[in-house]
């Protein structure tokens, strides 16, 4: 239940509001998550007036403001085509019009294709105050009280990486039972991330080469059983999808 609404005109006022302890205070970008019913009293800090919705290409990176919508990101010509596929899988057109990139990441769980892709791409997140830089994967483990008084300013996505996204779902529109997102850089570095289970995507591999990706994926989902699928089923899917990612990335490098 929203008990207070604030729309600050500058970042300092926003940070002061978010640092309060007397009432739980959270930032609001598009509001697609906060509009869901909640029994807990919360105060919201609307970020619309803070100019955090810009998207700018800087060399081999795309710097995306925290309140840029998923649709505005999807409309960027230089966006990796595979990341566009992930965004379309993550949210419908109507939701993409209001959901923000930072909000979608912070609200994600272990079934989010977008969170998996952002972690695979080693997306860097700038936090205020202080312009602290952390990876998207680290951010997901700092949600809650660890982020009190902090605000995502922008996210930096690499444009010089190749991305592969493979998934299995009950229907094409459903969130995945298992998905694999793998990113490879010209240096040979490869990051493999699994999603479809748990509270957050799981980094299965980050190394200088792709050998061992399939076994790393299977090991990462060794105990990944829940009401949607058994651990054995997910483990085998993770192995196969990791193999497909590596194969696709290899073809793209030629």
Image (tube, grey):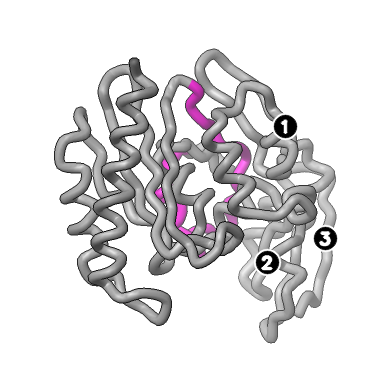
Which numbered disc flags the more N-terminal residue, 2 or 1? Answer: 2
The quadrant of the rendering that contains the N terminus is bottom right
Q: Which residue is mark 2?
A: 25
Pinpoint residue 74: horizontal percent, then vertical percent.
68, 36
Q: CA distance from mark 2 to mark 3?
A: 10 Å
Instruction: Give the quadrant of residue 59.
Output: top right
User: Which residue does the image show at 50% across and 67% down from the upper left?
Assistant: 170
Pinpoint residue 202: horizontal percent, then vertical percent.
34, 55
Q: Is residue 115 left or right of residue 247?
A: right
What span is in magenta? Answer: 133-159
Q: Which residue is mark 3?
A: 6
Task: Identify the mark at residue 63; answer none if there is no mark.
Answer: none
User: Which residue does the image show at 58% across and 26% down from the upper left?
Assistant: 62
> Which residue sits furthest bottom?
39
**Circles 2 and 1: CB distance less than 8 Å?**
no
User: Which residue does the image show at 76% across and 54% down from the upper left?
Assistant: 30
| Viewer-nearest residue: 18 or 80 | 80
Q: Is residue 166 in sight in this rendering? A: yes
SS for tag 1?
loop
Task: Identify the mark at residue 75; answer none if there is no mark.
Answer: 1
Query: From the viewer's perspective, is residue 201 above or below residue 67?
Result: below
Pinpoint residue 225: horizontal percent, then vertical percent.
31, 75
Q: CA distance from mark 2 to mark 1?
A: 32 Å
Q: Is residue 233 left or right of residue 83?
A: left
SS for tag 3?
strand
- Which of pointers 2 and 1 indicates the residue nearer the eye? 1
């Amino acid at each position: 239940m929203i008990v207070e609404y604030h729309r600050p005109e500058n970042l300092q006022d926003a940070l002061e509001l978010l640092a309060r302890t007397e009432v739980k205070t959270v930032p609001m970008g598009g509001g697609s998550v906060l509009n869901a019913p909640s029994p807990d009293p919360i105060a919201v800090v609307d970020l619309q007036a803070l100019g955090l919705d810009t998207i700018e290409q800087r060399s081999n990176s795309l710097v995306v403001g925290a309140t840029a919508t998923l649709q505005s990101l999807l409309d960027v010509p230089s966006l990796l085509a595979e990341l566009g596929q992930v965004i379309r899988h993550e949210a419908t057109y109507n939701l993409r019009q209001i959901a923000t990139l930072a909000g979608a990441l912070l609200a994600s769980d272990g079934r989010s294709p977008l969170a998996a892709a952002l972690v695979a791409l080693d997306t860097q997140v700038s936090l205020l105050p202080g312009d602290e830089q952390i990876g998207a994967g680290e951010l997901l483990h700092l949600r809650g009280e660890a982020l009190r008084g902090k605000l995502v300013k922008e996210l930096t996505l690499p444009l010089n990486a190749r991305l592969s996204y493979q998934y299995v779902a009950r229907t094409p529109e459903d969130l995945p039972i298992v998905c694999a997102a793998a990113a490879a850089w010209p240096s040979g570095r490869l990051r493999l991330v699994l999603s479809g289970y748990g509270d957050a995507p799981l980094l299965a591999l980050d190394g200088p080469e792709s050998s061992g990706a399939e076994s790393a994926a299977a090991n990462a989902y060794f105990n990944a059983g829940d009401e949607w699928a058994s651990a054995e089923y997910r483990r085998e899917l993770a192995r196969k999808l990791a193999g497909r990612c590596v194969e696709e990335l290899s073809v793209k490098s030629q």
